């Protein structure tokens, strides 16, 4: 019996660790999900357990190598960004994988801006809203001044996708999508590392830059396998759209973050963009992608938990709520702000406390929550579109299953062709495609993404 030739992709999210096998036509053959328990860093802050992650990857890889049904031709990795693994001369890991939500010491941040320029200047030049550890370049600055004894031992700092690749190849590299995702490292107008990176000697710790499509051929148990260099998950999720669609589009990627990605807007960011939480990501060829994001999924979860507690519903009840047009029209007649958001920093009217007394039912309060989140969503999409000629909006990720969200999107963007795309493969598919030379055509998304065109609502407003 002939073995099926497959590409393995390890798709590492903050919560779910996924493992996929794809055949040569990018059809999913195997998928495994797991959640790994977190560990803590030296300050007791929760963080990824790197050893557990490595063991999980190794066990899955070896199991597929031993499986008589498959012949592994290639491996690649897509992971969340803003996370560095620091290695010494011998390749030993020096520090925990610091969590990008860990607060950064204010004195270190003050020192950084004092030495290298104002917050706004740095944010604009590196296309990175200033958010402490989420700007992974700042993690290196933080180590240099907070833990100099550790910093001195670093030979290479690898972003997480490249570290996973290194586990298989022993070769240290950097690539555009990881360098370019809100790291503070890259000067987009200069198309090189920012001056501060050279001034602090950080460039010496970063591996040589290779294209994201690069791969390293290696022999493993006498089998020739192509190993990719890894890719940042947001850029990876965008890739199948870029490769298969010729007309300009915006991709709204929903989940913990709601990220509006516009690969057809290469304007430099303005001060106003930065204040609106706009940033750039990088395509695999180093071109910029204008993006704006807000912490929608995170806020949604916080607020829904409160709604469930207040109305005595079990968590999960919200998933069944369908869009109610009459309810929506009634709420829009007396439009106001009733929710105090906790994790969102976008400008909106601040109220001292959430007011749920105004709503008789869970459904009514839930519709109001979605209206308030949608106001911010409209704002971030409009910022990402800028002045580019966009007619198509694709929505993927967790909120495609949210009926109220999708109906509101179709209503507010009725002058666009709005499509929901349902691919549980998300960023894994892009990671598989980037190391393949196979051309794809317009029908690709249709086959792989169960695309549905949303009908605009006819509302008597």
Image: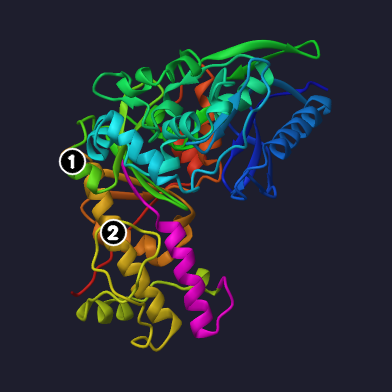
Residue at the spot x=49%, y=36% of the render?
81
- Is 337 placed left or right of 134 in the picture? left
Could you tell me what secondary structure mostly forms the magenta stretch? helix
Packing grade of label 2 (10 A; few <14, some 14-19, many >=20) is some
Q: Any magenta on residue 318?
A: no
Q: Nearer the viewer, residue 315 or 94?
A: 94
Q: Any magenta on residue 313?
A: yes
The residue range painted magenta reads 291-316
Residue with the mark numbered 2:
376
Quarter placement of the C terminus: bottom left
Q: Secondary structure at mark 2?
A: helix
Residue 50 in the image, given as x and y percentages of width and height: 67, 37
Residue at the spot x=40%, y=33% of the render?
183
Q: Are marks 1 and 2 in contact (CB under 8 Å)?
A: no
Which residue is most to the left?
387
Residue 76 in the image, given as x and y percentages of width and height: 60, 26
Q: Nearer the viewer, residue 442 or 167?
A: 167
Quarter placement of the N terminus: top right
Residue 5 in the image, given as x and y percentages of width and height: 70, 22
Q: Is residue 298 visible?
A: yes
Q: Nearer the viewer, mark 1 or mark 2?
A: 1
| N-term mark: 1 or 2 | 1
Mark sitting on residue 271: 1
Mark sitting on residue 179: none
Toward which corner of the image does residue 404 lie, by quadrant?
A: bottom left
Toward which corner of the image does residue 313 lie, by quadrant?
A: bottom right
In the depicted structure, whether residue 25 falls above or below residue 421: above
- Is 88 placed left or right of 278 in the picture? right
Q: CA distance from mark 1 to mark 2?
A: 19 Å
Q: Is residue 213 visible?
A: no
Q: Secondary structure at mark 1?
A: helix
In the depicted structure, whether residue 131 falls above or below residue 303: above
């Amino acid at each position: 019996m002939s073995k099926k030739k497959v590409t393995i992709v390890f798709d590492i999210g903050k919560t779910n660790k996924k493992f996929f096998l794809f055949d040569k036509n990018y059809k999913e053959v195997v998928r495994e999900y797991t959640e790994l328990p977190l560990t803590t860093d030296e300050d007791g802050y929760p963080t990824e357990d790197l050893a557990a992650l490595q063991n999980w990857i190794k066990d899955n890889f070896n199991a597929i190598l031993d499986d008589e049904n498959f012949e592994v031709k290639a491996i690649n990795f897509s992971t969340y960004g803003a996370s560095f693994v620091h290695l010494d001369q011998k390749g030993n890991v020096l520090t925990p994988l610091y969590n990008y939500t860990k607060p950064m010491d204010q004195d270190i941040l003050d020192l950084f801006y004092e030495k290298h320029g104002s917050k706004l200047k740095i944010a604009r030049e590196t296309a990175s809203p200033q958010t402490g550890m989420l700007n992974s370049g700042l993690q290196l600055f933080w180590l240099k001044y907070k833990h100099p004894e550790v910093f001195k031992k670093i030979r290479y700092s690898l972003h997480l996708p490249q570290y996973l690749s290194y586990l298989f190849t022993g070769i240290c590299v950097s690539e555009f999508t990881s360098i370019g995702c809100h790291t503070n490292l890259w000067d987009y107008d200069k198309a090189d590392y920012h001056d501060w990176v050279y001034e602090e000697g950080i460039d010496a710790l970063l591996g040589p830059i290779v294209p994201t499509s690069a791969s390293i051929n290696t022999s493993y148990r006498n089998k020739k396998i192509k190993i990719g260099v890894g890719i940042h998950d947001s850029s990876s999720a965008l890739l199948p759209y870029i490769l298969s669609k010729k007309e300009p589009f915006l991709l709204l990627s929903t989940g913990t973050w709601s990220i509006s990605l516009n690969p057809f807007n290469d304007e430099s960011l303005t001060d106003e963009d930065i204040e609106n939480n706009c940033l750039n990501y990088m395509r695999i060829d180093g071109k910029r992608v204008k993006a704006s994001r807000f912490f929608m999924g995170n806020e949604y979860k916080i607020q829904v938990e409160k709604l469930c507690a207040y109305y005595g519903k079990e968590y999960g009840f919200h998933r069944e709520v369908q869009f109610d047009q009459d309810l929506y029209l009634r709420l829009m007649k007396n439009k106001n702000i009733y929710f105090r958001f906790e994790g969102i920093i976008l400008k909106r009217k601040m109220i001292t406390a959430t007011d749920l007394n105004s709503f008789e039912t869970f459904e009514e309060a839930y519709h109001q929550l979605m209206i308030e989140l949608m106001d911010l969503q409209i704002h971030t999409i409009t910022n990402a579109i800028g002045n580019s000629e966009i007619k198509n909006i694709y929505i993927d990720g967790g909120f495609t299953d949210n009926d109220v969200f999708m109906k509101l999107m179709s209503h507010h963007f009725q002058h666009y062709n709005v499509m929901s795309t349902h691919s549980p493969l998300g960023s894994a598919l892009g990671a598989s495609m980037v190391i393949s030379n196979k051309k794809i055509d317009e029908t690709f998304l249709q086959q792989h993404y169960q695309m549905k065109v949303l009908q605009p609502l006819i509302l008597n407003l």
